[in-house]
Image (spheres, rainbow, N blue to C red):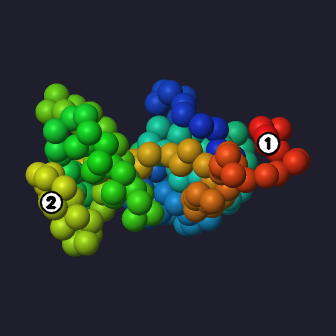
Amino acid sequence: MLTLIERLGPIAAERASDTLTLPYERRMLGRLKAVSDSGRELGLFLDRGPVLRDGEGLRAEGGELVRIRAAVEPVVTARVASGLPLARLAYHLGNRHVQLALGEDARGGFVRFPPDHVLEALAERLGAVLEHHEATFDPEPGAYRQTGGHLFPHDHGHEPHHHDHDPDHPHAH
């Protein structure tokens, strides 16, 4: 078994001797057994960290490199007019604390997520047209500190409001 122990970030395809195609749910795991695209047994023993991205390289104990590929899986792509409608769609879906992929193609901007009846109904209420299909799912990386794929959205410090008094805060009045 080839033991993969280090995350390298994005690497060029030609640097890797093999690839490992995984759906989003399995790319969240730092420890798993899998079979590479060429049929080799792999074991991932990675430090906890963000989801493995499409194109990311992993280094084996012996120095060999394996490149991660995002699997094609069932997704829902929600499309709505650019500008405020798209911002509103992304805001309300993101407010549900689910993983979303945001993108743009020849047909405009979109929000993509795994099939979910509640999210689909919400998107339609916001005027989106839904397309159920198969595609890779590579969600937006979190803007907050990430540990093991979980976001901690309450880590951000809010500026005190004018009526707040905090003598230790540099912007206190």
- Near mark 2 (Cα within 10 A), the count class, few <14, some 14-19 or many ≥20, is some
Q: Nearer the viewer, residue 13 or 78?
A: 78
- Tell me what residue is drawn at x 53 percent, y 48 percent: 142
Q: Earlier in the sequence, mark 1 or mark 2?
A: 2
Mark 2 — residue?
124
Q: Furthest residue to the right?
A: 168
Left or right of 149: which side holds 104?
Answer: left
In the rendered image, is residue 75 in sight?
yes
Left or right of 134: which side holds 151?
Answer: right
Tell me where residue 125 appears, x and y as whole percent.
Answer: 16, 61
**Above or below 44: residue 142:** above
Tell me where residue 92 appears, x and y as whole percent.
Answer: 33, 57
Tell me where residue 111 appears, x and y as whole percent.
Answer: 28, 48
**Above or below 67: residue 15:** above
- Tell me what residue is drawn at x 53 percent, y 40 percent: 56
**Above or below 45: residue 128:** above
Residue 65 lies in quadrant: top right
Task: Identify the amino acid type marked 1.
Answer: Ala
Q: Disc 1 and disc 2: Cα gap in Å?
A: 44 Å
Tag nearer the camera, 1 or 2: 1
Q: Are marks 1 and 2 in contact (CB under 8 Å)?
A: no
| Label of residue 89 in the image | none
- Tell me what residue is drawn at x 25 percent, y 72 percent: 118
Mark 1 — residue?
172
**Label 2 SS:** helix
- Tell me what residue is drawn at x 49 percent, y 57 percent: 27
Tell me where residue 16 appears, x and y as whole percent.
Answer: 53, 35
Task: Identify the amino acid type marked 2.
Answer: Glu
In the rendered image, is residue 3 in sight?
no
Left or right of 121: which side holds 30?
Answer: right
- Near mark 1 (Cα within 10 A), the count class, few <14, some 14-19 or many ≥20, is some
Which quarter shows the C terminus?
Answer: top right
